[in-house]
Amino acid sequence: MIAIKLDTSDAEKKAAKVDMKEVARIRRRGMIFSVIVGSIAVHVIALVLFGLWTVARYWKQPEAVFEVKKLVKIPPKIPEQKMNLLQHEAMSPKPVFTDKLVSIRPIDFALPDLPTVDMAQMLPLDPAELISDQVAGLVGSAGMGSGLGAGLKGGGGRGSGKGLSFFGMKAEGERLVLLFDVSSSVVNKAMSMGIPLSRVRDETLKLIDGLPISSKFSMIQFTQNFKMFSPELQAATDGNKKKAKLWVQNEWVKTGTMSGKGVVSNPRGLVAVLEQSFRMKPDLIFIISDASFQWRPEGGIKDIPYKELKRELARLQGGLEQPAVIQFLGFQPKSDDVKEWKRLIRRSGGKFRILKSDR
């Protein structure tokens, strides 16, 4: 009986060992399976989160903004007239000295006195003479006559390079704008002084004749409205001078009213005329008026405040490389207007002159 019990106990122990191994193997399989399933789950979750992040980033992208930047280009200036003058100067004969001192060997005594040289050959030549000489050589002296003389010296022009003169007021500049107030008040005052606007027209024609080829010019007539000879400065060539004189003769206003072709409606009076003038980049402006200016910015006509004129002139002058000189010729201006305008143009180097009758 005892031997049988021992055998049964050994069998049970062996069976128990087998069961433990099986359980351990099952547990290992379960653990491996759990690890694999967990890894797959982690990767799936990571992929889902990455997909959500990618989609969210796509939907949260900022909207495209298209921006167009303005390019400011300054057109190059072609100094055609100056180049023409330089060509004329290059064609002029240069002084030649024929007297020479030559020493063939060193000497102990002093050299003799230098010969007398005509210093007239060393003096700078007048540009007007250069042009006159060269043109005379090209077209002959018969073609010159009094035409060139009047063109260079007539009307107080700048043929000598020393400036121009308008109604006796001298000034210097190569980019000229003439502003003519032809309102009824100016017409009446000019007539009472014995200086009708036809006299102003004749003086203007003389000034145009006297402009040198290196200068540019334009003109504007105005009441409240205005009309221009040209919106840009024109070179003082013979052709442009001829066009300007025809415009003055045919378009000149003498009645105090302005209408017809080329007239620009203008409720802002002198302010808009000055804006148009400064767009031409002048270095000299002549204003001919009685120094009394009105506008109607809100419908009713009234005097332009001088603080407004001061602000506008400062703004316009600031847009130029160098301030334009403003010269003012006045027909019977009031003393208060003279005082204010002298203040306005003093900074530009300009002057105020009251026109007086020759009678």
Image: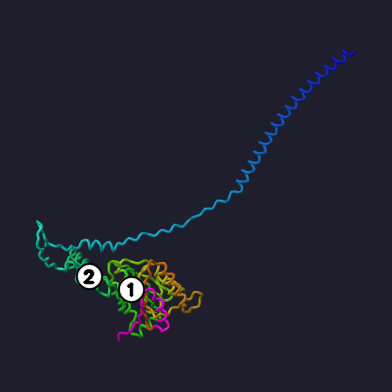
Disc 1 element? helix
Q: Residue furthest bottom?
A: 359
What amino acid is found at the position of numbered circle 2 in the picture? Leu
Q: Which residues are magenta?
A: 333-359
List the residue tagged with mark 1. Answer: 248
Marks 2/1: CA distance?
Answer: 22 Å
Q: Is residue 349 magenta?
A: yes
Please tell me whether residue 115 is drawn above or below residue 17 in the rendered image: below
Please tell me whether residue 297 is drawn above or below residue 357 in the rendered image: above
Residue 333's x, y, as percent? 39, 83
Residue 124's x, y, as percent? 21, 67
Res. 148 mark: 2
Disc 2 element? helix
Could you classify mark 2 by the number of other residues whose Cα lies within 10 Å: few (under 14), some (14-19), or many (20 or more)? some
Residue drawn at (68%, 34%), measured in percent from left and top? 39
Residue 101's x, y, as percent? 11, 61
Could you classify mark 1 by the number of other residues whose Cα lies within 10 Å: few (under 14), some (14-19), or many (20 or more)? some
Residue 26's quadrant in the figure? top right
